[in-house]
Image (cartoon, rainbow, N blue to C red):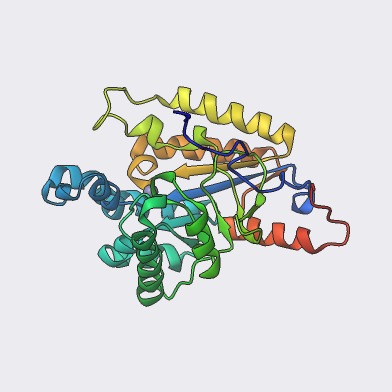
Amino acid sequence: MSLIPDVPPRPSNRAAPAPDFAWPAGKRCAVFNSFDVDSESAWIAHDVTNVDRLVTMSFGGYEARVGVPKILEYLRSIELKSTFFIPGWVVEAHPKMCEAIVKDGHEVGHHGYLHKRPDPGDFEQDVEEVDRALEALKRVLGVKPVGYRAPSGENYDGLLKHLRDRGILYSSSWRDDIRPYRHRLRDGSDGPIELPVNMSFDDWLYGLSNRYSPRPMFPKEHVLSIWNGELDQTREWGGLVTMVLHPQVTGRPMRLGIFRDFIARARGFGDVWLPTGEAIARHFMAAEKLETYKPAN
Ligand SMILES: [Zn+2]
């Protein structure tokens, strides 16, 4: 009897390769600037007893008090629409903050209820996270989201199917491509579209790592060096840059400047598309329907 676990040797992702389609209006690449508005939920998900640790909670509380208003003010000033993935608990805890996001015309995406990290062993709980958040977004904001980003970046076949059946058109969590593609579920049916994430654009790695890690924060020059370099090469490849920004990080005074400088440079090229996630997903779906559109296999 073998001591090696019986894991069939095949790719974990059954999706076809990313199809080759043009970005709209002659654009060369796309930058999907998106925010995960975790507020206190990220810290509660880390340890539920944190709820009474008020200084730990205050990292997340920064978002409603300062981070989100400052980001909204900046986005208004440059007339840029963005996507905000918000957990249902945050929508209920900070309705005014979330209403301001909707009022400014930004897209609101699904980000779980209490930011629980999905796990294949927890299907029933994960379904409750999805459905309770859908109810909260509808009741408080009047929003029915079409995008989903997995809290703490995990997902699996059964949950992806449930999300699709609840009307989720796109996911933005996988790390395995630089172009959008369509998921294929294990029953052979089509899943949501994937807008894959570039982990180099997760601001948490650079700007908020020291509460549970001894690593120092990264200065502006280091972050811009990574972000600009990634964009330059992605632009040559005709790909998608998906940013994963958190208002408790990028809403900090100096860090908003990093985002501002990156966006200004990206816009300066004149051929970089800066849409919401929904706009990318709908462009992908339109491309799928064109007669000239040929899936990669
Ligand atoms: Zn999150």
- Does 118 sit above or below residue 130? above
Q: Residue at x 83, y 62 (%)?
A: 290
Between 52 and 25, the one lying in front of the other is: 52
Between 250 and 244, the one lying in front of the other is: 244
Q: Is residue 11 left or right of residue 128?
A: right
Q: Is residue 249 left or right of residue 49?
A: right
Q: Residue at x 83, y 56 (%)?
A: 293
User: Which residue is farthest right?
Assistant: 292
Between 74 and 10, the one lying in front of the other is: 10
Q: Position of residue 247 (x, y in %)?
A: 37, 47
Q: Position of residue 198 (x, y in %)?
A: 55, 37
Q: Residue at x 33, y 64 (%)?
A: 91
- Does 217 sit above or below residue 124? above
Q: Position of residue 248 (x, y in %)?
A: 32, 44
- Tag count: 0
Q: Position of residue 183 (x, y in %)?
A: 63, 53
Q: Is residue 17 left or right of residue 134?
A: right
Q: Is residue 76 visible?
A: no
Q: Residue at x 54, y 57 (%)?
A: 81
Which quadrant of the view contains residue 17? top right
